[in-house]
Image (cartoon, coloured by chain):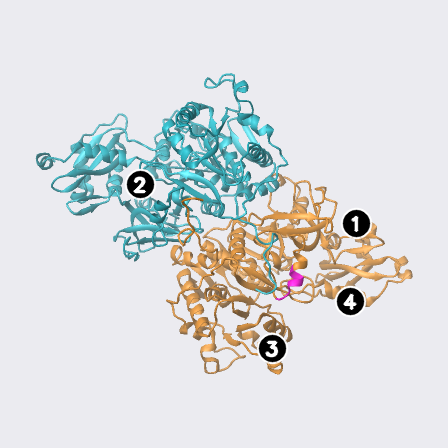
Chain colours: A orange, B cyan
Amino acid sequence: MEGTMKCSANYIPLSPISFLERSAIVYGDYTSVVYGDLKYTWKETRERCVRLASALAQLGISGGDVVAALAPNIPALYELHFGVPMAGAILCPLNVRYDSVMVSILLRNSDAKVIFVDYQLLHVANGAFELLSKLKAKLPFMVVIQEVSKPTANDNIKNSKVVFGNLEYENLLKTGKPGFEVRKPKDETDPISISYTSGTTGSPKGVVYNHRGAYLNALAEILHNAMSPKSVYLWTVPMFHCNGWCLPWGMAALGGTNVCLRNVSAKTIYENLSRHNVTHMGGAPTILNMIVNASAAERKPLNSKVEVMTGGAPPPPNVLLKMEELSFGVTHSYGMTEVYGPGTFCSWKPEWDSLPPNEKAKIKSRQGLHHVLMEELAVKDPVTMKSVPSDGETMGEVMFRGNTVMCGYLKNLKATKEVFNGGWYRTGDIGVRHSDGYISLKDRSKDIVVCDGKNVSTIEVESVLFYHPAILEAAVVGRPDDHLGETPCAFVKLKEGFNANAEDIIRYCRENLASYMAPRTVVFEDLPKTSTGKTQKYVLRERAEAMGSLTKKMRSKI
Amino acid sequence: MEGTMKCSANYIPLSPISFLERSAIVYGDYTSVVYGDLKYTWKETRERCVRLASALAQLGISGGDVVAALAPNIPALYELHFGVPMAGAILCPLNVRYDSVMVSILLRNSDAKVIFVDYQLLHVANGAFELLSKLKAKLPFMVVIQEVSKPTANDNIKNSKVVFGNLEYENLLKTGKPGFEVRKPKDETDPISISYTSGTTGSPKGVVYNHRGAYLNALAEILHNAMSPKSVYLWTVPMFHCNGWCLPWGMAALGGTNVCLRNVSAKTIYENLSRHNVTHMGGAPTILNMIVNASAAERKPLNSKVEVMTGGAPPPPNVLLKMEELSFGVTHSYGMTEVYGPGTFCSWKPEWDSLPPNEKAKIKSRQGLHHVLMEELAVKDPVTMKSVPSDGETMGEVMFRGNTVMCGYLKNLKATKEVFNGGWYRTGDIGVRHSDGYISLKDRSKDIVVCDGKNVSTIEVESVLFYHPAILEAAVVGRPDDHLGETPCAFVKLKEGFNANAEDIIRYCRENLASYMAPRTVVFEDLPKTSTGKTQKYVLRERAEAMGSLTKKMRSKI
C-alpha cells in the first residue's frame, strides 16, 4: 500500500526467544525456575540461556544444527528450550524411557551435533555411543548434566569434574559469554525443535516445529488456562513430550514460575504442590490417577485450587469426579505431537454448572473445540472430505488446520504428504460432532474393533470399565476371531485389595453397554505404558493376536 | 528442512477474521453484542458480518478497496470491523467530531469506495459530498445506518426507507448472502484498516494496520487485561480511534460480550455498567474524570469490580486514587495510533501493595513496559540511538519495534521513513527509564518547555496542578519570553463551586515544584479537546503565542 514499508521497526519474525528477552526486563527479579532448594530469577535464566547459546556457538553449533537432550524435567532442560534456539539451533529432546538402541537410531536420524545427558541417563547415552561407534558414525559432543545441588554425590560419574571438564553443563555455561549476540530466526517458519512421537504406534517419527507455531501455541496455552504472571506451574508433563505442550515458552511469556520435578510420583506431586503454592499443572490421566489414588501419607493439604490440564487420552469420568472432590479443577484437552500438544480444549460452559456430577464428568471427558490460535477443527469423511453432521453419532476422522500444526516429519516427506493429504492434518482419530459443536473421540481409526460388522468404540467400553469399583486401569483392543472378525478384549489392572473375575467384569459390561460391545475376553495384568503415561495399545494388540481366535465353545460359555 | 512442507494444513495467514469464525462455533449462542434492548449472539454476528461482506462484494468492492465509516460505537461499526475485511477490503473509521471539510479531505485521501454513515452524522457526510461534487471528485456509495430500534423516529431522515432503499444498513445486509465465501487475506501483512491520527498535531495522517498486527495486538489486549469468555466490555473508547485499541477483534477472540454505547456520559456509563454487569472498559483520563465527578443522581451501584484500561494521556494520580476508592481497578497503558493503541502496560507488582495510596497512584501513572506481543521498547538518544541509563532522570526519546507497529502513513512515504529512521518507530515522546525498567513520560518532544535553558516537563507541572483542590483540568504549554526563551503557562478549568486565582495557583506550584518549573501565567478556561479526550495542546500553544512575551514587570510581580 502506498506510503507503507516493511522494516525492522514493524516486522519481527515471531519466536519464543522474545518472551524470555521481555521477561528478563519486565519480571527480572521474579522467580523463573524452582527445583528443590534451587531458585533462579528471570534475569538469571536469561543470562544462563545466553551463556548456553554462546557456549554452543563456541562448540561450532550454527544455524540449523540439531542439539539433542536426554533429561527429565530439570532446570537444564528448561534452559535448553531457549539456549539452543538462541544459538540458531534446533532442540531435539528425547524420551527418557528410550533405550540405547533407540537413542542411537534417533541421534542418527536427527543428525544431532551435541547431546545433553542427565547423569542418571548416562548409561543409556554411553550405550548409544558404543552402537554408533561400531557403525563408524560420527559421534556428537556429549555434555553431562549433574545434579546441581550435589554434583559429587553421584555414583554414576565419580570424579566427574576431572573427566568431563567443559563438557559438564555448569562448566560449559561458564565458558559462554553473557554478551553473546542472540541469533534470532531470519524466518519465523525456521525450525525450533524436533519431537519424536511417543511410540504408541511403535516407530517414532521426528515431528518438526517452527518458531511461529511455538510462539502461537505458547500463547494459546496460557490464554486457555487463564494463567497470569502469578501462576506457578508444576512440571509433571515431560518437557520432551511436544516440548511440554509448549509451556516452557508459555511460562516465559507470562513471567510466571516453573517448578521443575525430576521424579513424578504421588508423593513428589503433593510435596511440590504444597511447598511452592502451585496454581497449575498438567498430565495424562495416569497423573490424575496418581493424585486420586495417593495414600493418606502421601497427601498434603493444598493452599489453593490447582488447575490441571489433562490430555494424551480421554480422562475417565470417575477419575474426573474424584479430582473435583479433592478440589482440583480439571480441563481436558486433546491433541498430539503433530499439533504442538493440545489442539482442542473442552472449555466449560456455565449452563453445565447445574448438571449432576456424573453428567458433568461425562461432558468434561469430551474433546471439545479447537483453541483460539488453531485455525480449524473438522470431523470429516476421510474419502469424500465432507464434514459429518453435528448429530453426535456419525463418525468421521478428526482433522486440524492451522499455524500450530507441525511442519512435517523429519526426512519423511512421504509420511508428511500422507497426513497432509487434502490440505488438512489427518489425525487418524475417529470422532463425532455434537449439536453444540464439541467433538468426542470414539477411537483411533486403527483401535476401533469391528465385531460382526459392527464398530465398537474401545473408548466407550473403557469408560464403563473404569466405573467398575475394583478396576484401576483398563484398555480394550480387538482379538482376532474366525467367525466374528474381531471381538473386544479387555486388559485390566485391579486396585490393590480388590477382587473380580472375568465373568464379573463381562457381566458388568453387558449391564452397562449394548451386548455386542461387551468384552468377550478379560486379561488381568499391568498395562504397558509410554513414558507420557499413554497405554501402548499396539503391545496389547500383539498379545491379543497371539492369543488367537476365541473358540466357539468359549464364546458360547460367556 | 527435509521432510517438511508448507501448505494449507500448517500455514494460515494471521487475521482477526479467524476469531469471529471460531467464536461463531465455540460461543455460538453466547451474547456477542448488546445495545440497549438489542442483543445478538456470536452466530448472529458472524452471519450479519458475512452478509455485509457479501453485500459489499455485490456493490463492487474488491480486494484492497477502502470502506469508510462515520459512526459512534453502535453495533454496525462493530460489524464493519469484520464485514469489511471479510470482503477483502480495508476499513477506515473516521472520527465522529470531524466536520464536512475534514471528512471530504479524508475520503479523497483514502480513496474510499463506500462510506457508512450514522443517521446523526448525515449532515456531515452530506456536506462532505457537496464539497467533493464541487471538486468533480468521484463520490463513494453512501450507506446510512439508522437507529435499529426506532428507524422511523428519526428527524434527520424522514421516509428513509423510500429514499435509501438498499443503501440503508439493515436493507443492505438483507441483500447479502449468508453463504458468501469469506475473502481471507492472501498475505497476513495485507492492510486491514486505516486510522487517521486524532489530531493533536493538527493534520491527521492515515495510519495503516495489517491483519497480522491486528491479530497480535488483539491477543495482547486480552492477555494483559486478564479477560475471559465471561468478560463484558463497555465501549467507551471510540472504535474509530486505533480501531478501539483492537478490542473489536479481541472480544471476538474471547467470545465475550460487547456493550455498545452511542453517547458517552457519566449517566450512560453507570447505567450500562450496572445493567449489563460490565467487567471491563477503557478510556482516556477524561472518562475517568467523568466517573469520579459523577453526581449522586448519575451514579449506580456496581455489581462487581470494573477493570478500566486508561490511556491517551497519563492519568493524574488523584483521579486514580478516587477511582480505586469507587472500587474500579485501573491499569494505565501508553501508546498511540501508530502502535495499534496501547504499546505498554504499567503492570502492577505485588511488592507495591504495601505502599501508601499516594505512592501507588504515582507508580500507576507511569507508562510501564511493552506488552508481550510488542518486541521492544527503548528510551534512546534520538541522534546517537544509544539507550539512556536506567536512572529515572536521563531523558531520551521513547521508541518501539515490533509486529504491532503500523505499516506506515498512507500515501506519505516521507513521513513513514522519518518515523522509522534507524529501524525503530520514533514516538516523539520524551521519557526516562527507572531502575526497574519501567518508563515514565516526561513530555512530547514538542511540548517540553525550555525556560532559561532548563527543561520543564509539562506533565510534571500538570500532575501538581491536578492535586490542587479547586482544579478540575489543567494543561501547561510554553509562552514565548524575550528574556527566558519560554515560560510555563497553565490553562486551568476549575471545579464547579470552587474558586482560586492565578496567584494562589502559582504559589501552590512553587510550594510543590522547583521554582523554575512553576507556571508564570495562569489562564482560566475550558480546555480544547480531541474527540478521544486528549487536550489539543497545539491550540493552547497558539493562544500562548498570541499572548506574546511576559513583560519584565509582570514577571517580577509574581
Query: Residue under circle 3?
Result: A128
The label shown at residue A513 is 1
Labels 1, 4: front one = 4
Quadrant for the N terminus of chain A in the image: top left
- Taken as a whole, is the magenta stretch helix, strand or loop? helix
On the same chain: label 1 and label 3?
yes
State the SS at label 2: helix
**Mark 2: which amino acid?**
Pro
Measured Cα–Cα span from mark 2 to mark 3: 65 Å
Judge whether residue B354 can be spotted in this image. Answer: no
Number of numbered discs overlaid on the protein picture: 4
Q: Which residues are magenta?
A: A411-416
On the same chain: label 1 and label 2?
no
Q: Quadrant of residue B290?
A: top left
Tell whether position B229 is magenta.
no
Residue B432 pos. (x, y %) = 29, 51
Residue A304 pos. (x, y %) = 51, 51
Q: Nearer the viewer, residue B415 or B145?
A: B415
On the same chain: label 4 and label 2?
no
State the SS at label 3: helix
The label shown at residue A543 is 4
Labels 2, 3: front one = 3
Q: Residue at x 66, y 51 (%)?
A: A399
Quadrant for the C terminus of chain A in the image: bottom right
Q: Quadrant of residue B485?
A: top left
The label shown at residue B317 is 2
Labels 1, 3: front one = 3
Q: Earlier in the sequence, mark 1 or mark 4?
A: 1
Q: Earlier in the sequence, mark 1 or mark 3?
A: 3
